[in-house]
Image (spheres, grey):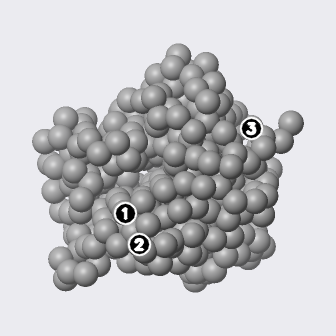
Amino acid sequence: MRTPLPATASVVIIGGGIMGTATAYWLAAAGVEDVVVIERDELGAGSTSRAAGGLRSQFSDAVNIQLGARSLEVFRSFESLFAQDIDFVASGYLFLLDNDADAAAFEANVALQRSLGQNSRMITPAEAHELSPVISTEGLVAGVFNPDDAHCTPEGTVAGFARAARARGVSIVQHTEVTNIVVADGRITGVETTAGPVATDTVVCAAGAWSQAIGRMAGVDLPVTPLRRHIVVSEPVDFDARRLPFTIDFSTSYYFHSEGDGLLFGAPEEHDVREFDTHFDPRWPEHLSQLISRRTPALENVCIRRGWAGLYECTPDHNALIGRSPEVPGFLYACGFSGHGFLQGPAVGEVMRDLFLGVEPFVDVSGMSTERFDTDELRVELNIV
C-alpha cells in the first residue's frame, strides 16, 4: 500500500537511498518524531542500487577515513542489528600501484590511516599477487592492503534501514517528487510535492547526483554534478571468487570483486560523460576488456551476464558536502560523495542526526561544508575510483 504524504513533518528528507534511509533511521532511533522521507522513485533507485558495494577506510583525508571506519562497524553488524542479510564479504581492499609517485602518496595515506587505528599496510607486488592470484604484476611497484575492508549488497542495506525506520514511525513516501522548497524570510516553511504540500521547518537534502537542483529550490548552492560509470557482473567462475579482495588497479581505476558465484567489474569510460545519462554504452565493454587483459589476463575468458550504468555525484574536490546552510538554517545536506557515498552512508546518517539535534558529531565535518569553496584551501580526496 502506498504511504500517504503527511501534512506536517519535523524533518523532510529528500532522497530514499542510503543517505536518506540511514538518516531517517538514526533520527527516529534518537526519538525524533514525524520524520518523512520522500523518494521520487523506488527506494535506492538512484545511485545506491547501481553502486559496486565497496566498503573501506582507505582514504587520503582524515574525515573520510573516520566516516568509512565508522560505517564499517555498522556494516559488520548489520544482519544482527537490522535482521537483514547484506551478503557482507570481508575479503579486504587491495590497491595496485604502478608508479613511484602513487606509491609515495599511498605510503603517506597509510601512515595517516594507521594513526587513526586502521590496519592498512604497504605490500610488495609479489604479496599482492598472493592475495589476488588473478592479477599480473607486470609494471607494479607496490600495493596497499587493508584486510578489514569489505563489500556488500547496497539494496539490502537500504531495505534494512528503511524497515527499521518505518518500525520507529518514519513515513517513507515513494513515487512522489519534490517540486519546491518554500522559504520565507530565510526560513523553510514547507515543501511542495506532486502529492501535495508538507509543512516543515527542516529539510535534509540526500538526493545524490540530483542535489544541485534541490539546493536551488531553497536558494542554496550545492556544487554537485553527475558522472556516469558502468558495471558488469559475470557468470559463475570456476574458483572461489569470494576469497579475492576488492582489487583496484589505481592508475586506470579498473576494479573487480566477487558477486555471488561470479565477479563484478567496473572502470571509468574512456571519455567522461557528465550528464544525467544512465544508458549503458555498448562501446564500454571493449574498453573494459582491454583493462582486464592488461592487469588480469587470467580473467579474459570470463563470460559477462549483465551490466548497468549509474551516476557518481561529484564535487570539485571529490569530498562530500555535509552540513547546514548558514543562509537557510533549516536546510541540511549530505551529498556529493564522488563515488564513496554508499560506504559512508551509515556514519553520515549519524552525523546528520547530530547536526539536526545540535550535538557534536563523532567526527568534525565542518571542513565538508559548502563554505569551503569560499576559500583557496581545498583538500582534494585522492583515493577515488
Q: What is the C-alpha distance between the residues marked 1 and 2?
A: 8 Å
How many numbered discs sit on the rendered protein? 3
Q: What is the C-alpha distance between the residues marked 2 and 3?
A: 56 Å
Q: Is residue 364 visible?
A: yes
Q: Which of disc 3 and disc 2 is earlier in sequence?
A: 2
Other residues around mark 3 within 10 Å, as few (<14) / some (14–19) / many (≥20): some
Q: Is residue 147 left or right of residue 40?
A: left
Which residue is the site of mark 3?
Answer: 236
Q: Position of residue 79 (x, y in %)?
A: 56, 21
Task: Kindly check if marks 1 and 2 are in contact, taking CB atoms under 8 A apart as contact.
Answer: yes
Which residue is the site of mark 1?
Answer: 329
What residue type is disc 2 on? Gly
Q: Which of disc 3 and disc 1 is earlier in sequence?
A: 3
Q: Is residue 181 left or right of residue 302?
A: left
Task: Kindly check if marks 2 and 3 are in contact, taking CB atoms under 8 A apart as contact.
Answer: no
Name the residue at 30% across, 62% down.
368
What residue type is disc 1 on? Pro
What residue type is disc 3 on? Pro
Is 375 rendered above or below residue 200?
Answer: below
Name the residue at 62% across, 62% down.
191
